[in-house]
Image (spheres, rainbow, N blue to C red):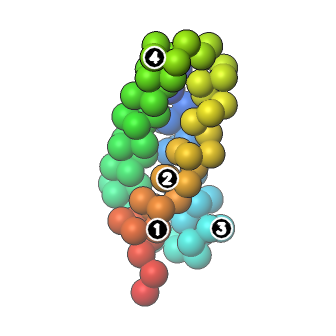
């Protein structure tokens, strides 16, 4: 699961930088890419740790563990992007 999460994170960064910046935050500044990658790197680490806990400690299978992580990680991602990447002016 760490490799699958890594590839999905890379694909997410590649696709989401432009669309999230423009559509969600109304920002087209391409200089923010390193901060964006930093936030996604942190979210990746949290995701892998959460999956490990849910699978090993609680005995969930990979699909249920992944499903349980979707909403909390989406909220975490939004809050971090709002705070550290696409700050309101």
Task: Calculate the distance from the C-alpha at mark 1 to the C-alpha at mark 3.
Answer: 13 Å
Mark 1, secondary structure of its residue? helix
Find residue 39 and report its horizontal and vertical position in percent: 38, 51
Quadrant of the image occupied by residue 34: bottom left
Q: Earlier in the sequence, mark 1 or mark 3?
A: 3
Task: Calculate the distance from the C-alpha at mark 4 to the C-alpha at mark 2.
Answer: 24 Å
Vertical order, 73 against 7 (above or below)? below
Rendered image: mark on residue 82: 1
Task: Calculate the distance from the C-alpha at mark 2 to the C-alpha at mark 3.
Answer: 15 Å
Task: Calculate the distance from the C-alpha at mark 3 to the C-alpha at mark 4.
Answer: 38 Å
Find residue 24 and report its horizontal and vertical position in percent: 62, 68
Q: Is residue 69 left or right of residue 40?
A: right
Task: Calculate the distance from the C-alpha at mark 1 to the C-alpha at mark 4.
Answer: 32 Å
Nearer mark to the viewer, of 1 and 3: 1
Quadrant of the image occupied by residue 70: top right
Crowding around mark 4 (Cα neighbors within 10 Å: few <14, some 14 to 19, many 20+) is few
At 62% from the left and 59% from the top, the residue drawn is: 19
Crowding around mark 2 (Cα neighbors within 10 Å: few <14, some 14 to 19, many 20+) is some
Q: Nearer the viewer, residue 55 or 30?
A: 55
């Amino acid at each position: 699961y760490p490799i699958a999460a890594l590839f999905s994170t890379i694909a997410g960064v590649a696709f989401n930088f432009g669309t999230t910046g423009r559509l969600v935050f109304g920002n087209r500044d391409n200089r923010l890419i390193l901060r964006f990658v930093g936030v996604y790197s942190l979210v990746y680490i949290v995701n892998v740790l959460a999956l490990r806990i849910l699978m090993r400690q609680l005995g969930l299978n990979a699909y249920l563990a992944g499903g349980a992580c979707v909403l909390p990680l989406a909220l975490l991602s939004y809050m971090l992007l709002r705070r550290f990447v696409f700050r309101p002016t």
